[in-house]
Image (spheres, rainbow, N blue to C red):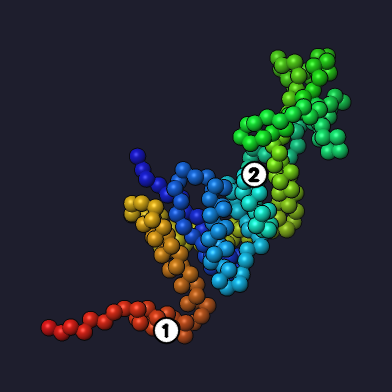
Amino acid sequence: MKLNYLSQLSVDTSSYIITSIGAFHADKKDSQCLDAVLDQIDNNLKEYGLAAKEIIADANYSSSSALESLISRGITGYIPNAGTYKQERKGFTYDTENDRYVCDQGNTLKFIGYKQHHGTSKLYMSKRSDCKNCPIRKTCIGKSTYKMLTNSLTRPLFDEMHNRMIDNYGKQMMTIRKSTVEPVTGNLIEYLGMRKVNTIGIKLANKCIIMAGIAYNLKKLIKYGGKGLWDAIISLLVSQIPLNLNYY
């Protein structure tokens, strides 16, 4: 049995500076951590009069609650929908005006109500008489007597995200993500000891991860600030060290 933690970090795409970093219990999904990460980003940036307007993340951060959170915060997200999302139902066309599906055979599946299953879903069902003599009945419904489709109430959020991600700007954003976050993660693992955290407890794990993030950011600042900034940092650190004036 292992005690594992999940590290989450965000990186500014223009400066490659880490804007938030921390440890979470590994029983959480990435999408369940997004709200806490956004809170950290907000707290870290607001002191400087800054705010996140756009975020880029991979498909692991895709969920209805995550997309709703982005909307409530006024943030535009670029997050590929999870593999379970299907933009189109093969053999069926959605009629937006009448809120129904129409199959390739010309039959309709009307909205019949709601179902509680991992959140509320909308149900669409065909008439048994329409399916009874359908030429593709066996491949479509098998032994069933009707066809049923379900849609999550939050499906419009995923449809909107899909359209955003297939746009040229959305594709460009994903290219930026690969060249921004992944190199930082590799740097933390290879050079700052984040391949393994030798501590017990979430608080100590957080300390290790945050210190690694601070070290990374300091290296960035020194690189762009030159020797003057390095001297200022050393002076600050030395000023915080208590002097031992006892002589023996």
Q: Which amino acid, by three-letter code, is at mark 2?
A: Ser
Q: Nearer the viewer, residue 232 or 41?
A: 41
Residue 64 tag number: 2
Quick check: 90 above or below 173?
Answer: above
At 63% across and 56% down in the image, what residue appears? Answer: 56
Judged from the image, the secondary structure of the residue bearing numbered disc 1 is helix
Where does label 1 land, which residue? Answer: 231
Tell me the kind of residue under disc 1: Asp
> Going 43% across and 68% down the picture, which residue do you hit?
215
Q: Is residue 111 left or right of residue 11?
A: right
Q: Indicate whether 84 appears above or below 60.
A: above
- SS at mark 2? helix
Mark 2–mark 1 contact, CB under 8 Å?
A: no
Q: Residue shown at 82%/35% (left/top)?
A: 99
The quadrant of the picture occupied by the C terminus is: bottom left
Of the pair 81 and 113, the residue shown nearer to us: 113
Tell me, for residue 172, which label it has, or none. none
Tell me which residue sits at (48%, 69%) in the image: 217
